[in-house]
Amino acid sequence: MLRFWTAGESHGETLVAWLSGLPAGLKIDQAFLDRELWRRQQGYGRGGRQKIERDTAHIVSGVRHGQTIGSPVAILLENKDWKNWEESLPVGAGDPAKHKPVTSPRPGHADLAGALKFNFPEARYVLERASARESAARVAAGALAKLFLHALGANVLSHVLSVGNATVGDAEIAWEKLCELSARDEVLLNCADPEAEPRMKAEVDNALKSGDSVGGVFEVVAHGVPPGLGSYVNWDERLDTQLAAAVMSLQAVKAVEIGSGIAAASLPGSAVQDVIAYDKSGHRFLRRSNRAGGLEGGVSNGEDIIVRGYLKPISTLRRPLESVDFQTREPVKAAYERSDVCVVPAAGVAGEAMVSLTLARAAREKFGGDSMEEVLRNFRGYCEQVRNF
């Protein structure tokens, strides 16, 4: 079974990604891992932290001679900002006078709820772990999952559908356009619609001028996923259940949509279901549309899997909202630390990681195997079975 965890704090020495369950013999492309981490750091509206960090994946276990060896893979991501926090957040007792407490919780952040839960007198430790900096470790683990999916002919990419009130047009975005978008060396807002992207930039500019922040919607598309991943037999085995939970787990995501789920709720069934056809030349069943987002009954159906994340504006504001001081209980302004204005493109990359990890786990459960040779043999046999159905 494919399992992953992350560890580390926003201003700690390192982040750690731990991934277990990859078969032996999967080729690891270091440059690909580092580019995925680079993509997460891009986007108009990112803050000063991105000028400090240059994330690279330092693999310390589970890979030898460029291939996985079947044991857990551990990746370290250095926090270059650690040198500025080493005395404030030491592992040992350190000097209490150099501590940097967060005394006024930010509305919308985990500050207050986390402090109450763990009985902390202030929110520094909550902020450190709840921070979206943690998503860098997810992207590192997700890059490994992507490499596994690539071996099965599948790929996962994202693009931005909206920032604030600026949205893309109604035209469907072709997969080839997403591939072109992901290959760019300059990322503005990772939007495939050239007319919408300037409007999105204006939304970020307006938020920046007013000391505010802005959210939006990103879409993750998984292309080339075979039919049959997931299951309808138990609620927690449904692939849509797992995907929704995975994307919902990302910081600031407050809603998840699969396919045209939101619009479908107000339409008649005849306008929602995807008509089934058969391609005799390709020996495959297909749908004339993809409103279901590639999933029916909790099982992948061979069409593109489409998952959208709805991202609220981030909680740290340069023009802080009202809060209450932890010690005095008196009204104060919420705490502010260096922060972003818009993170929708970055959240999309993190969404790719979570979707990739979920699909890779489902594929491991479906095809088994301890080595890539065995996995591919099982995968090809299943594909032949589907073609001859």
Image: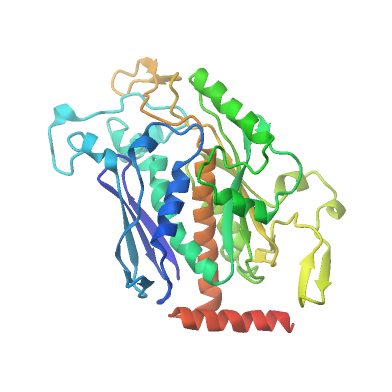
Q: Where 315 falls versus 181 (above or below)?
A: above
Residue sitting at 62 percent across and 51 percent down?
A: 178
Pick whichever, 248 or 40, lies toward us: 40
- The colour scheme used here is rainbow
- For the N terminus, the quadrant is bottom left
Q: Where 252 falls versus 368 (above or below)?
A: above
Q: Position of residue 123 (x, y in %)?
A: 32, 32
- Residue that sits furthest to the front in the current view: 185
Please state if 367 lies on the left or on the right of 91 as rendered. Answer: right
Pick whichever, 295 or 217, lies toward us: 217
- For the C terminus, the quadrant is bottom right
Image mark count: 0
Residue sitting at 42 percent across and 31 percent down?
A: 47
Q: Where 55 falls versus 146 (above or below)?
A: above
Residue sitting at 84 percent across and 53 percent down?
A: 269
Q: Where 199 falls versus 137 (above or below)?
A: above
Residue sitting at 12 percent across and 32 percent down?
A: 95
Q: Is residue 50 visible?
A: yes
Q: Position of residue 173 (x, y in %)?
A: 70, 49
- Residue that sits furthest to the top in the current view: 331
Q: Is residue 220 visible?
A: no
Q: Position of residue 88 (x, y in %)?
A: 20, 33
Q: Position of residue 331 (x, y in %)?
A: 38, 15
Please state if 42 lies on the left or on the right of 85 as rendered. Answer: right
